[in-house]
Image: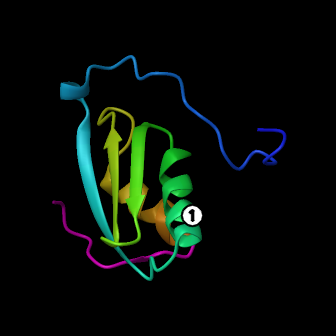
Amino acid sequence: RNVSEHTFGLKPPCPIPREQLERIEIRIGGLDCQACCFGAYDALARTEGVEQATASFRAGLAVAWIDPTRTNRMVLVKALEQRGATVLEDDAR
């Protein structure tokens, strides 16, 4: 983390069983490069209650596995929008 100036880190393994996590998919416009994709991933990964996150610039999609007792879809959308992402839908998938 010191070398990357705290822009990248790994979380410890999730203590919650995978079947208890909720999978949230969010379509994002403008994910046209790896840097934009990393920004979306980083916004999700740093959100409290997100146990795992991915983002794909090819699919224009971010996916988060969350602890539903600690966060929800609206919080994730807000985190992405604060980073400048254009969320293409606001309904649950």
Q: Quadrant of residue 57?
A: bottom left
What residue is shown at x 53% (from left), y 23% (from top)?
A: 12
User: Which span is picked out in magenta?
Assistant: 83-93
Dominant SS type (magenta) = loop
Where is residue 82 drawn, in percent x and y? 56, 68
Q: Is residue 48 above or below residue 25?
A: above
Q: Which amino acid does label 1 sit on?
A: Gly
Depth check, front residue: 54 or 64: 54
**The stretch drawn in magenta includes residue 67:** no
Where is residue 91 drawn, in percent x and y? 19, 68
Q: In this view, does 79 lie above or below 52?
A: below
- The quarter in which the N terminus is drawn is top right
**The stretch drawn in magenta includes residue 92:** yes
What residue is shown at x 30% (from left), y 64% (from top)?
A: 26
User: Label 1 belongs to which residue?
Assistant: 39
Where is residue 77 drawn, in percent x and y? 40, 63
What residue is shown at x 49% (from left), y 56% (from top)?
A: 41
- The quarter in which the C terminus is drawn is bottom left
Left or right, 33 with reference to 91: right
